[in-house]
Image: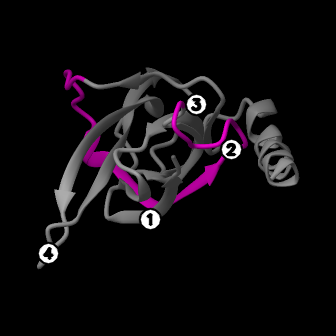
Amino acid sequence: MLLRIWAIVLRVLPFVASSHENDAITVSGKLAVSYKIKWWPYQEKVNVKSIHVDLLKGKPLNLINSTANTRITIRGFVAAMEGNSRPTITGVHASERFVTVYGSKDKVSRIELTPIVGVKTSSSYRSVDLPFEISFNYEVNTFRWGKNDIVFASGDQEELVALFQTK
């Protein structure tokens, strides 16, 4: 697990160190997570290609703990913008709900994550699609004893994670 995190950090560092305006958008670490819809006029520019969820080590899920920590990585690209408006990822919108499994009384937790696109003025940006990779920690809760299925979704990409709550 630690090796995977270091691999992500090492892969991200060249992007962070670069100042070229047409380089990839990379955000790792603290990323604002919003639970309310706001004025986001550039959302149609986001195209998510993958979502990956890692369970981080923490306290075991048991009678007194129902919280698990995850590390989420979302990759994709932001479509080119006209003029000198360079796109960037300013945060993530999160929405959580229960979904009934078709043909069953069973339910799963569905967490939808949407990268929020902002812009900054840049005279050197040249209207190209910019790939992005964002990574952030996200806390989830179990909702019953035994197996808890949680679907993490972003765009049309999904990843199913199963957590086990013991007594």
Question: The residue under label 1 is which amino acid type?
Answer: Leu
**In the image, which is nearer the foreground, mark 2 or mark 3?**
2
54 part of magenta stretch:
yes
Q: Tell me the element at label 2.
A: loop
Question: The residue under label 3 is which amino acid type?
Answer: Ser
Q: State which tag comes first along the sequence, 2 or 1.
A: 2
Q: Mark 4 and mark 1: span between their CA atoms?
A: 16 Å
Q: Residues within 10 Å of mark 1 (few under 14, many from 20)?
A: some
Which region shows up in magenta?
36-64
- Between 121 and 140, the one lying in front of the other is 140
Residue at (70, 35) in percent of width and height: 20
Q: State which tag comes first along the sequence, 4 or 1.
A: 4
Q: Residue furthest bottom?
A: 103
For disc 1, the marked residue is 160
Residue at (44, 65) in percent of width and height: 160
- Between 90 and 7, the one lying in front of the other is 7
Q: State which tag comes first along the sequence, 1 or 3.
A: 3
Q: Mark 4 and mark 2: span between their CA atoms?
A: 30 Å
Note whether residue 50 is visible.
no
Q: Residue 56: which disc?
A: 2
84 part of magenta stretch:
no
Q: Residues within 10 Å of mark 2 (few under 14, many from 20)?
A: some
Q: Mark 3 and mark 4: span between their CA atoms?
A: 50 Å
For disc 4, the marked residue is 102
- Between 21 and 162, the one lying in front of the other is 162
Label total for image: 4
